[in-house]
Image (cartoon, rainbow, N blue to C red):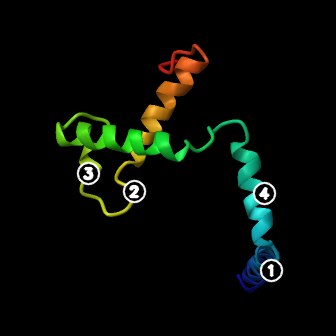
Amino acid sequence: MNKYGKEIKDEITKKAKKIQSIKPEEITQFWENVYLGKVSSAPKTEELIKLCDLIKKRYELGIPPGFDDFGKKSNPYGDALIWFDMLKYAKNNQQNIND
């Protein structure tokens, strides 16, 4: 047990040192590469305001998606914005998003 315990402890120590040496910009670059070409660009301010107004009206009428998030303090429009973005993507690329 002592032999394996020491090997495991040494391996954990080695991995922890490696993780600590990773720079924040390397993490950012990693995630940018993961999502490259898979997410759309942020909407322009005017478009975002119109979408949020539309979403608020839908929420008041209980129309999904996301109306359960209406009372959230942090990003109550997130689910609906993603849904509208998916619809826009499907229309622009003439793709069925159900596939």
Q: Position of residue 59 (x, y in %)?
A: 23, 42
Front label number (4 vs 2): 2
Marks 4 and 2, how far apart in space?
25 Å
The residue where tag 1 is placed is: 17
Q: Position of residue 83 (x, y in %)?
A: 43, 34
- Circle 1 — which element? helix
The residue where tag 4 is placed is: 29
Displayed quadrant of residue 58 = top left
Marks 2 and 3, how far apart in space?
9 Å
Residue 31 visible (yes or no): yes
Q: Is residue 84 above or below residue 77?
A: above
Displayed quadrant of residue 49 = top left
- Circle 4 — which element? helix
Q: Residues within 10 Å of mark 3 (few under 14, many from 20)?
A: some
Q: Residues within 10 Å of mark 2 (few under 14, many from 20)?
A: few
The front one of 49 and 92 is: 49
Q: Position of residue 24 (x, y in %)?
A: 75, 70
Q: Earlier in the sequence, mark 1 or mark 4?
A: 1
Q: Earlier in the sequence, mark 4 or mark 2?
A: 4
**What mark, if any, has residue 70 been given in the picture?**
3
Q: Residue, x 70% and y 81% (percent of image)?
A: 1
Determine contact: label 4, label 2, CB under 8 Å: no
Say left or right for 57 vs 35.
Answer: left
